[in-house]
Image (cartoon, rainbow, N blue to C red):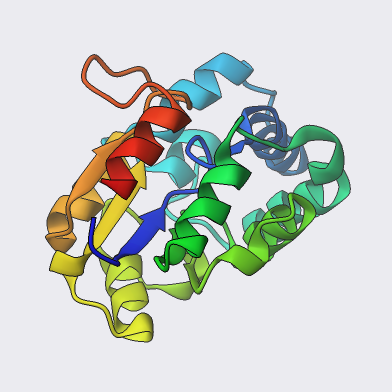
Amino acid sequence: MDKKLIIFDMDGTLVNSSLTIANAINYVRQNLGFEPMDSKHILRMVNDHTLNPAKTFYHAESFDADHERWFSEYYTKHHEQELVLYDGIKELLETLKSEGHALAVATNAYRRSTIESLTHLGVYEHFDAIACYDDVEKGKPYPDMLYKILDELKHSNDKSVFVGDGPRDEMASKNANIPYFMVDWGFTEHTDAIRSVKELESILLN
């Protein structure tokens, strides 16, 4: 592969954050006076692009400042105990950087939580740009954050690729006209996807 910009989704692609996401959503629900939801049910719905997540989880039309504050509060207190990189991800990022590729993250997580997570996991410095939910008008499946990264790093979409684990990622990539690779070690199960980090590395370095 020519020297390219490789953009990654974070949760379910780089980071196994399933426990933290479910717990953080239930922490917000608790503060709103709602009963907790089953963790597996939360994770099934997180990547369902047909749902409004604010309405699904918090009975609101859109996320507000309290939702963000409480979610980030939980992340800050618990990310060191609950977040881990998927096996082989750190080595993959190091290899891609050594080969001269630019790296970025496009995530529907909030910026504060994203920076805390990637810093704690020791990979924040690997990325040339990060675009988060609160950096753009619309998160994935809209292409806003991918366009933001392309503009910031002065890359074209045909010299970039996006790696994600769910339909929101795939739709955002299609909407931005960026080649897409689906991985299958995160929150969503797919019949046609990349099954291992080694397989992804082979594709990205070809």
Q: Is residue 18 above or below residue 135?
A: above
Q: Is residue 140 above or below residue 13?
A: below
- Kindly tell me whether residue 65 is visible in this rendering: no
| Closer-to-camera residue (62/184) | 184
**Residue at x-position 27% and y-position 73%:** 147
The image position of residue 94, as x and y in percent, is 57, 54
Res 48 → quadrant? top left
Q: Is residue 51 above or below residue 113?
A: above
| Position of the N terminus by quadrant | bottom left
**Residue at x-position 26% and y-position 35%:** 50
The image position of residue 92, as x and y in percent, is 52, 45
| Closer-to-camera residue (34/3) | 3
The image position of residue 4, as x and y in percent, is 29, 66
How many marks overall? 0
Q: Left or right: where does residue 134 sit relative to residue 61?
A: right
Q: Left or right: where does residue 16 sit relative to residue 59?
A: right
The image position of residue 140, as x and y in percent, is 33, 54
| Closer-to-camera residue (136/38) | 136
**Residue at x-position 69% and y-position 23%:** 36
- Kindly tell me whether residue 147 is visible in this rendering: yes
